[in-house]
Every structure is written in structure tokens, then in C-alpha cells.
Amino acid sequence: MVLIAYQIILFLIISLSYYLTLNHFMAVTVG
């Protein structure tokens, strides 16, 4: 159970960082 929760948290962190990086890249490209 703990391992599953850890994997979910890790996935969320990676998704968030990827989303923020993509957002920053788009802002820099458009701006």
C-alpha cells in the first residue's frame, strides 16, 4: 500500500514539474 501511494505521489510530482516546464517553455517561445 505504501509503495503504491509513493508511486502515485512521485507520478504527481513528475507530472507537475513537466507541466510547469512545458508552460515556461511555451511562455518563453510565445513571449
Image (cartoon, rainbow, N blue to C red):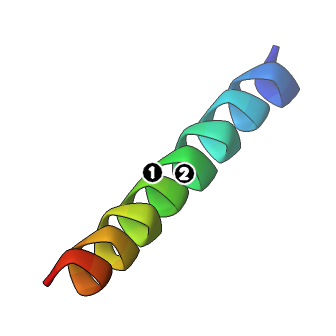
Q: Nearer the viewer, residue 20 or 2?
A: 20
Q: Nearer the viewer, residue 14 or 4?
A: 14
Query: In the rendered image, which quarter is residue 15 located in?
Result: top right
* Above or below 11: residue 2: above
Q: Nearer the viewer, residue 20 or 10?
A: 20
Q: Residue at x 43, y 53 (%)?
A: 19
Q: Is residue 8 left or right of residue 18?
A: right
Q: Residue furthest top?
A: 1
Across and down, in percent, residue 11 comes to: 67, 39
Q: Nearer the viewer, residue 2 or 18?
A: 18
For label 1, the residue is 16
Callout 1 environment at 10 Å: few (<14), some (14 to 19), or many (20+)? few
For label 2, the residue is 13
- Tag 1: amino acid: Leu
Q: Residue at x 13, y 84 (%)?
A: 31
* Above or below 4: residue 27: below
